[in-house]
Amino acid sequence: MRDAAIRAIHETHALNRRDDDRRDFIERAGGAVVALASAYPDGHHVAAHRHGRSQLLHVRSGIVLATTDVGRWMVPGGQALWIPAGTIHAVDMMGGVRMQSAYVRPAAIAGPPASLRVVAMTGLMRSLMAEAVAIGETKSVDGRDALLLGLILHEMPRLEELPLGLPFPSDPRFVALCRRYLDAPTPAVTIDGWARETGMSRRTFTRRFQRETGLSLSVWRQQASLFAALPRLSEGEAVTSVALDLGYESVAAFTTMFKRMLGTSPRDYLSANAPAAGRE
């Protein structure tokens, strides 16, 4: 037990040193795009940091949870996270995580998203990312490599946003309610109930919650339910078990919510992303 703990500490320190070295390289690199691959063990935490470049973080396997001072974003295998340059963020790994990241000079993209968001990876972008990583840490590129990296710059702004961000309010009363919900998600939460707990009228609560999170309580709750459901589904847990544990009266009700948020059923979503998660 003690030897395993010591080994884990050494591995964590080694990963941290590697990440520090890579951040230095990324900041010094001269090209518009730099792409690197990384792997992390389950439970690894990357402390809060920021980059001078924007980052497209493509999760190939496992689940990544990114945290900023305005919310949390969950990225399941097969999808990606867009992190604008200068955004302070911490990252936690759920399951063994393999990822590819493209770091881009902000001025190199026309109309990049201004806020952090989860985006759906296309087959083309997955292929481009793999090719970009294969180019490696070269000082300069030309010919085919330059065309590949240039196409990445054109495709990045076209990636569609997925509703897997969870903005957090700043009002302590809202924070307490939101954290309680994340600990035990349930569809029984109502605006009237939370308004009573905060001592507000329904109208005041609705207005303030929307102002602090940018979302209605209904949409916020649905996205929080996805936060709770996706890791369990990705680990192979039955849809029925997850749906009932989250308080849904039936699998159909849970599936309806899932389709509304992600545009597909839980089984189809996991089936579509399984190959991407399994490829090396």
Image (tube, rainbow, N blue to C red):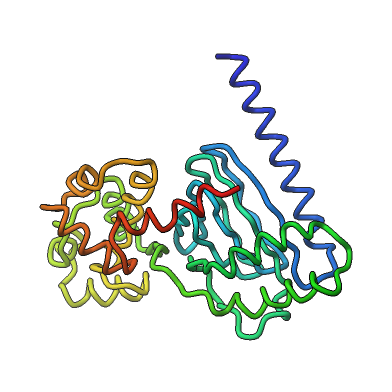
Residue 242 vertical placement versus 270 (above, below): above
User: Which residue is painted at 21% across and 42% down in the image?
Assistant: 241
Q: In the image, residue 242 lies at what x, y percent?
A: 24, 45
User: Which residue is painted at 23% across and 68% down in the image?
Assistant: 218
User: Which residue is painted at 89% across and 63% down in the image?
Assistant: 139
Q: Nearer the viewer, residue 187 or 276?
A: 276
Residue 207 vertical placement versus 51 (above, below): below
What quarter of the picture does the N terminus occupy?
A: top right
Q: Residue 102, located in which quarter of the rendered image?
A: bottom right
Would you say 40 lies left or right of 78 here?
Answer: right
- Extreme residue in the left direction: 249
Q: In the image, residue 245 lies at what x, y percent?
A: 20, 44
- Extreme residue in the right direction: 139
Would you say 221 lies left or right of 12 here?
Answer: left
Q: Nearer the viewer, residue 214 or 38?
A: 38
Q: In the image, residue 194 lies at what x, y percent?
A: 18, 61
Q: Nearer the viewer, residue 185 or 110?
A: 110
Would you say 2 lies left or right of 207 here?
Answer: right
Residue 5 vertical placement versus 115 (above, below): above
Q: In the image, residue 196 lies at what x, y percent?
A: 14, 62
